[in-house]
Structures are given as C-alpha cells and as structure tokens.
Amino acid sequence: MSQPIQIHPAKGFKERSLAALNDPAQRKNFRGAMDFLQMKRRAQFPDPKDLSSLRDLGEAIRRYSLARLPDLLEQLERNLTANGIQVHWAETPDQANAIALGIARRVDARLIAKGKSMVSEEVGFNHAMEAAGIETLETDMGEYIVQLAGEAPSHIIMPAIHKTKQQIAALFAEKIPGVAYSEDVDTLIQIGRRVLRRKFAAADIGLSGVNFAVAETGTLFLVENEGNGRMCTTVPRVHIAITGIEKVVAKLEHVPPLNSLLPRSATGQPVTTYLNLISSPRKAGELDGPEEVHLILVDNGRTQAYGDLQLRATLQCIRCGACMNHCPVYARIGGPRLRHHLSGPDRRHHLAPPARSRRHLPAVLRLDAVPRLRRRLSGAHPDHRSADPLAQ
Amino acid sequence: MSARERILGRLRAAPAGSPAVLPDLGAWRAMHPPPADAAAAIALFRKNIEAARAEVHDTTAQDWPLLLAKLAAGKGVRTLLFGPNTRHGAQLAAHLNAAGPAAPRLVPYNRPVDKWRDELFDDIDASLTGARGAIADTGSLILWPDASEPRLMSLVPHIHFVLLDAALIHANLLAAITAEHWATGMPTNALVISGPSKTADIQQTLAYGAHGPREVVVLLCNTNGDKP
Ligand code: SF4
C-alpha cells in the first residue's frame, strides 16, 4: 500500500525531441493547431468571472467525488449491477486486459470496434488483444487515420494533427482498396465513414471510455462529436467500457457543470454533438443496443496517488486537454516522435515521461492543483489565462 | 483478496484529506437564469442549434407530415425509417400513404436490428423520431429512445428529422435533469444531440456526417401554444 511512487526516466527523450524540433513541417502543423485551439477556448470564456466561478464549482464537484471515492465506487457498482451492467475491477493493465480477453473469448470475438478511450491506450489494450489474435479497430476518424498509418496518436483530442490532408489522401489511396487519391476533406471523411460502417456492423464487441460515471443512477456518461462512440456502444452485441476509478461523480446533477467545462476547454465548443448516457444493456422488447454491458474499473497507480494528499488532487483532472494545448514544450516537440500514447495531462511528456511499465503514476496531473508546481509554473497553465508565454 | 477488495482497501486506508463538502449548485443556477419567456427560449434554441448546422422549420401539429414530405422530396430521400407504434409515426403513415407514389417509402423499425442490420446500414436515407425535449442554451435535442423508437434511428440514417414540441424546451441541461427528475429513473440510453455528426480530425477542417447523420432537421411545433 505504501509503495514509493515511481517516476520513470525518459529513454531517448533528448534525441527524439531534437528530431522533432528539426522537422519544420510538423512544427508548423502543431503551432497552427495549438493556436487554433487556444483561440477557440478563449472565445468560449469571454468573462473571466464566469470562468473562475465555473472552475471553482467544477473543482468542488471533483473534490467531493474524491473525498467519497470508495463509497461512491461501491454505490456505482451497486446501481450498475442492479441495472444489469457487469462491473469488473483491475489493479493493473494486465488484469484489465485479462478481463476484456475473458469476455472476448467467451463470446468468440474476432473484431473489437473502439471508440476513443485513453485508458485503453494506458493499459496497452490493442496490443494485448492482437497478441491473442483479436483484431482491434480505432473508429474515431483521427485515431483510424493514425492506426492505418501504423503510428501513435499525437494529441488526445486531435490524434492526427501531425498529418496533412495530402498525407492522408496518399494513405487512403494506398491502404484502402478501390480508393482514388483525393485531398478533399469531405471526400476523405466519407471514405472513412463508408469503411468504418462495415466494421461497426461486423464487430462483436464495442469498446469505449467513460467521461463521467454517475454513482446515484448507475449511468455511464460519454461525450463525442462523430457518432463512432454511439456506434461502438450500440451496434455490437457486447459493449465494454473501460475507465479509471477516479471518473466517478456522486450525482447526475454534478455532470452539467463539468460537461460545460469539458468541451469548451477541449475544443472551444459549447457542447459536443452527442451526450450519450448509458444505464443498462438492451431490455426485453427493445430492438437494438448491446445485450451485455461491462465496466472495467482500472486502478493502475491511482490508489497510490490517492494515498498522497498532494497528488490526490491530480485525480481531479477531467481530461479536457487544455493544458496540452497551452504547453510550450508540447507545441515545440509534441507528436508521434515522442512515442507516447498520451501526452499533456497524461503526465507522459513533461513530468513523468514514457512509462510502459507496470507501475507508474496515474495518468493525470492538474498542474495548478499542486501548490509547489503552481508557484513554479504559474503562467504556463491555461487556468492562469496566459497563453503559451513563448508564442508571442 | 480480490482486486476489488485491495483497491477499496487502499482507498479506505488513505489519509482523510479535507472533508466532503456537497457542491453548491445554487450559484451555477444563478449564473444561468432561464430565458425570459417561451419565445426567448425558442429563439435561443433555434439560434444555437442552427449554429451547429441543424435546420429548424416552424410547423404545426397538423401540418408537419406535409412539410416533412416536401423537405424529404427536396433532399432526395427515397426511404424513411419511422416508429409505427408512436402517435406521430401513425400520423406520418396515414399521411404518406395517402400521398401516393411520389412520397418516400416508409420503413418501419419493428424488428430487432440483428435481423436486418445490413438493410438498416445500407438502404435507409432518413428517419423521423420524436424528441422528449430540448435545451436552449446549447441548442440540443433530448431523446430517450425506447422499444417503439430505437437507439439507432437517430444515428444510422443520413438525415434525421426530429419532431419537437416547443413547449418542451428547457433552459439548460441541469434544468432538464432537475425538472424531469432524471435521477429517479434513467432509461437504457438517454441522448442529448446538438446538430449533425461532425469531425475536425483532418487539418482542423470541419466536416459533417462523420459516422452519424449529415443533416439534422427539426420540425418545430407549438411555437404559438398550438399543442400537437
Ligand atoms: S490538468 Fe489539463 S486536462 Fe486535466 S483538467 Fe486541467 S487543463 Fe484539463
């Protein structure tokens, strides 16, 4: 229980950073994307008073959830179970993958369609499934592009920002049978839509993450724009959701304030196209939806962070990604060259670089939640309202 | 000991930290006053959902099937998915069957998806569903799919027509959750939909119809207190 907290060294970080710095095309992509996201976020919060009271409320909600974390997890489990959703607990990535594999073997799954899930990246889900002979397919457009190219996502919200439309056009023409080269973005998206529709219909299991898990009702709350998350959670016979134990909130009414912060900070949108609230598998008489729904609750070091009162605050993170969009280091060296599955708030680039090992820090760090860091870094975090200080 | 017991054990053994203080949503509610009246709520809903590129058409409880037929024809809709066991589904069927061969072919969603998945994915141009309500401050539609109007109706077809009673527009999501007592009983799947499916994953260029509908068309009834 009181294992020392381990931070893993970044192997080859310097070499890869230098290579990234010397890639002008990629630097231009990143700079452009970060400027765009910063500008859009700023436009969503015109009144600093509103922003700060919303942030205070968001923080109060997350602190309350964490203060009652073990009770809320038990309540969540009780209500999900009563609703017919099966709850599993995993201390390590291996356990999480073994649980998913057990389900996959039982239903004889060949193909798993995946909605965006950062915890699945954290536990090396695709790798574990593929080692067992089960195909996994990323269905978020950006993630699909990146997987088709055999690369790793370079940004949590925009996984393919390191690629130009010309590169994507060439990739589709090369990898998808019968597709001609086209740089038209609508055409490219329609190609992805066509290919992925066949896969949703064929998949045996849909995998998703969870944005908030509501204890009082036993509800999994997911946000997205594309609809692939809804496909993954509705079309296949089995839905597996995987998430960290810190994602629980006590009440349904705690979700709207958090969900007001999330998309506005993430992409500068007032709301995502879809809020998808799942509370049960298909009921008798219903004509669609999965027959089985599972939730895998992952620890993977989160209880370690919880045990340290300063680090506990890192579990308040709602993974909006705004800190990454404002991070001067990320804007300069971010990208697949860093070979991290998740960057930014997922601690893997500036604070505890890449960890594929079993025990590492939880995947979150809210910079301004740690007073010592706050003093050192004030001005670098978006919540301090100063955009990238090196940019101007 | 199971993984569950060990995880909960570690959490319970952790130092207490600051006490749990129930968040005060009163300030949030005060920051988000409801629109002055029904007309203002309707106007705000319309402005916001149109900004997300949905279409909104004013109509009435009697006239909407006619409007739907006209819009569908204009958009080249050949097949229209509907829920035959809903009141508006029956109204639509009665109208379109009378409209003759020019009208889109109505396809009832009346069997489990497992029996006709390929047809649903390949042959359906559009759908009509009702809405349970709407949200003004984000321009969103609330749907609670059920056995008579299943979940995939608002996801798979390229065009989603939605019938909305203007009296059911809430100020914001929190107001809807509270007023309708969602916490006392959630459906299998509740959806809040703010316009057509979209993505900006290729060079931050916005494209519509990523995986879900390319078009969302709201048929707005009862804007003058004319109940459908
Ligand atoms: S740490 Fe980063 S991702 Fe987490 S809530 Fe703060 S800004 Fe968002």
Image: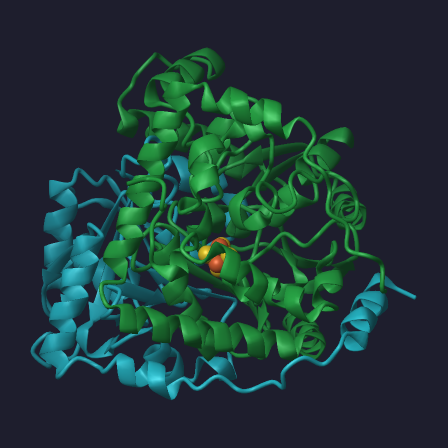
Query: Image quadrant of residue A81?
Result: bottom right
Compared across the picture, whether A108 is left or right of A248 comes to right
The quarter of the rendered structure image containing the C terminus of chain A is: top left
The chain drawn in cyan is: B
- x then y, percent, for residue A79: 65, 76
Compared across the picture, whether B72 is left or right of B21 comes to left
Q: Residue at x 29, y 59 (%)?
A: A270
Residue farthest right in this picture: B1
Residue farthest front in this picture: A376
| Vertical comparison of A100 with A162: above or below | below
The chain drawn in green is: A
Report if residue B190 is visible in the image: yes
- How many dots with numbers? 0
- x then y, percent, for residue A90: 77, 56
| Vertical comparison of A332 with A36: above or below | above
Work out whether residue A78 or residue A323 is closer to the camera in this orientation and state it. A323
